[in-house]
Image (spheres, rainbow, N blue to C red):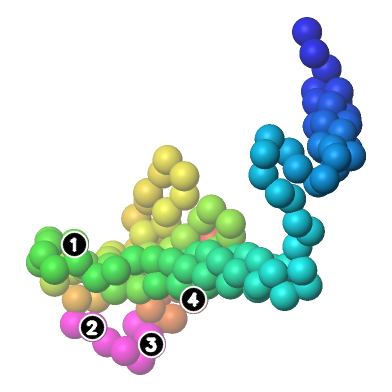
Amino acid sequence: MIRLSAIPLFLCSLLATAAEAPGGKVGGAMLEPMSATQLLETAGGLLLVLLLIFGAAWLLKRYGQLPSGSKGLVRVVGGASLGPRERVVVVEVEGVRLLLGVAPGRVERLHLLSSSGEKGGQPFEKELSKAVEEQS
């Protein structure tokens, strides 16, 4: 079995032998060193490809969920991340809003929100403070 560390050494020795060939020919083809402009063009092309890959990854992460054209029964109103794998999501199903806790392998209803769509948040704050007082 050939050790993996021996392969790069073999390739280096093969390249050194090819460079020492008379007339700079290897297999009938003339080998010329890369000029500075060719090296800059190659490095620039590589940099451009890497920038395109990172840009596409950023766009996919930023705008990953594209809106679907179909009207479903469940609509995601909003959400927030609580940790690396936990989220709180507000969904609306047939006019009823639910606050859901989502974790890997588990979805749990945390609260049933009013279906009137109140933006002030006063009823929820009152219910939350009442629930905290009951537990104390």
Q: How busy is the neighbourhood of tag 2: few (under 14 within 10 Å), some, or many (20 plus)? A: few
Image location of residue 67, percent across then percent down: 24, 70
Query: CB atoms at circles 4 and 2 under 8 Å apart?
Result: no
Residue under numbered circle 3 = 122
Classified by dominant secondary structure, the portion drawn in magenta counts as loop
Of label 4 and label 1, which has the lower sequence position? 1
Marks 4 and 2, how far apart at CA: 20 Å
Which-is-in-front pick, marks 2 and 3? 2
Of label 1 and label 2, which has the lower sequence position? 1
In depth, the one of 83 and 19 nearer the eye is 19
Q: Residue at x 66, y 72 (%)?
A: 41
Residue under numbered circle 1 = 74
Image location of residue 63, percent across then percent down: 40, 72
Residue under numbered circle 2 = 117
Q: In this picture, which residue range is highlighted in magenta?
A: 116-123
Residue under numbered circle 4 = 129
Q: Residue at x 36, y 59 (%)?
A: 100
Query: CB atoms at circles 4 and 1 under 8 Å apart?
Result: no
In depth, the one of 3 and 87 nearer the eye is 3
Q: Residue at x 42, y 81 (%)?
A: 126
Marks 2 and 3, how far apart at CA: 12 Å
In depth, the one of 114 and 67 nearer the eye is 67
Considering the numbered disc 3 on the image, is that residue within a helix, a strand or a loop?
A: helix
Query: CB atoms at circles 4 and 3 under 8 Å apart?
Result: no
Considering the numbered disc 1 on the image, is that residue within a helix, a strand or a loop?
A: strand
Of label 2 and label 3, which has the lower sequence position? 2
